[in-house]
Image (cartoon, grey):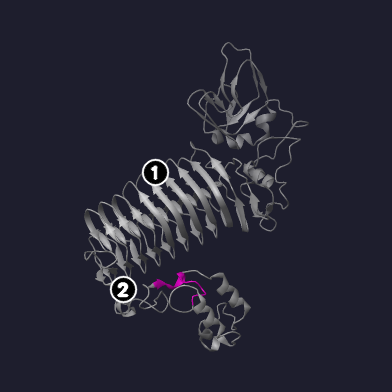
Amino acid sequence: MVYVHANGAVGGLLGWNHRGQVNHCYSTGRPVGAASVGGLCGGVTTGGGYEDTGNFWDIGASQTIESAMGTGRTTREMQTLSTFSDAGWDFLLTWSIDEGTDYPRLKWWPPTGTYSGGDGTEDDPYRIGTTADLQELIGTPGDWDKRFVLTSNLDAAGELLAPVGDNTVPFTGAFNGAGRTISNIVINRPGDDCVGPFGYVGLGGRIENLTVVNVYVRGRGDIGGLVGFNDIGRITGCRATGTVVGTGWRVGGLVGGSYRGTTEYCYAECSVTGSGQVGGLIGHCDDGQTVACDAAGKVAGTGHYVGGLVGYSHGTPLHFCSAAACVSGTGDYVGGLAGYTSYHVSCCYATGTVSGTENVGGLVGYAHEYDGTFVNSYATGAVNGSRAVGGLVGRVHLGKIAHCYSTGKPAGIEYVGGLCGRSITGGQGNFWDTETSETTVSTMAAGRTTEQMQMRSTFLDAGWDFGQTWAICEGTNYPRLRWSIPAGDLLCPDGVSFEDMGYFAGRWLMEDCGLTGGCDGADLTGDGRVDMGDLAILGGSWGQP
């Protein structure tokens, strides 16, 4: 599918026709311009003298019903044989068509679904092993409900690509990256919505175990490093690095906008820029699931709702997530993890610096409604704003905060608090560090010194769970969420280092670990023995904090 953008005459097939013959042609691309824009042809020379016989354009894909030549048809009609045969097209020697799934193709062109093998089913997915296979997928909307697997690491080499899936023909199939990588994708569509390597993922669509590296995506709204818009689809185990730019709303490092979609076990480290609803991972998520996801990089928004992980989250729980992004917004509702949320946040943390105007927090800018519940979470970054500024949350409206803490310094003019800047409800067992925050004022929490904040008893006496949820290296660090501690971090102080290696070596080849308390934690694989499998895990986490 082609995207055409210019300041002069623009058409899906022809910009301008000066008394030429155009017969039995079609276009499906979207033309964008300031004047003389047409689905098939932008303009013709007045006075006639040209031929226009049996030409068509797709009014859905082109998003226009105007053209100086040709006849507009729906996508379904454009994939129907009679549309063209009734207009005199030659399907004996010149054209072929796979009705209901694809547009007409010239017979000399390779058939749909050649790829590097497979038949597009669950048992035998199409194999994407070359950039030509990738281009085949991009250019064949009729295959966007099929199954695919990436069989080689690919380098797009900065070639200008188009998205797979759009709001007319969503991607409803499955793409399994199989742990492999596609590098250097460039998609530059400044006037378009739903832009990303996968532009629009629809109901039942799945993308899993795929990494895109050094991606550059530019568009208007619903712009993502991997997916522009996720409409009841599922994204699992995916990663994105690079640059994502949107001039409108709903812009994210991995996903731009999401409605009832699931994003799980994903990571993005991108420079993300947009207007409003901008996030390091997801720009906007509504009534979905975001679980075990992380984001880093730089996130900037010129409007409202900007977050290190999610810009705007409505009815979407955030569980076991983290953000280490530098977050800035010139508007309101800015947070280290989420700019705005109306639902549960549990076992999450944010470490980046945050700056905004009103309702600005180290973890969340604004927590709204009764379901805005925060438990077992923390933030450590400095926070700057003007009004309703907090080390953890800028403002809480009818929400609840329990067993959370913050250590960052909040700075603002009005309603500034160590943990929470402004609220109308109380908290339970929350703390902030009065020394690192340089403030003794906050709502919903109790202030403690740095020494007290690094004592287990401070939190245990307030009902914190140090069995399954939290751990602490007393005297050297604040509490940490157990899920975030590297597998090889066996001893205090925090971090995987030579102390852990020495401890591990002392338990080398111990057996029956299930009967001896996991061999003092050295049985990292849980197979009952301390051996090479455990050493591999220790080595893989070496140097992690």
Where is residue 310? Give x, y as percent.
Answer: 41, 54
Mark 1: which secondary structure? loop
In the rendered image, the residue lying farthest to the front is 498
Q: What amino acid is found at the position of numbered circle 1 in the picture?
A: Ser
**Helix, strand or loop for disc 2:** helix
Between tags 2 and 1, which lies in front?
A: 2
Residue 357 locus on image (x, y percent)? 29, 49
Q: Quadrant of the N terminus?
A: top right
User: Disc number at residue 455?
Assistant: none
Contact (Cβ within 8 Å) of mark 2 with mark 1: no
Q: Which mark is residue 275?
A: 1
Q: CA distance from mark 2 to mark 1?
A: 38 Å
Of 388 and 289, nearer the camera is 388
Question: Is 402 inside the magenta-drawn segment?
Answer: no
In the picture, measured across the screen, residue 88 lies left or right of residue 173, that is right
Magenta stretch, residue numbers = 480-489
Sequence-earlier tag: 2 or 1: 1
Instruction: Read off the residue under disc 2.
Output: 453
Is residue 41 visible to the viewer in this orientation of the structure? yes
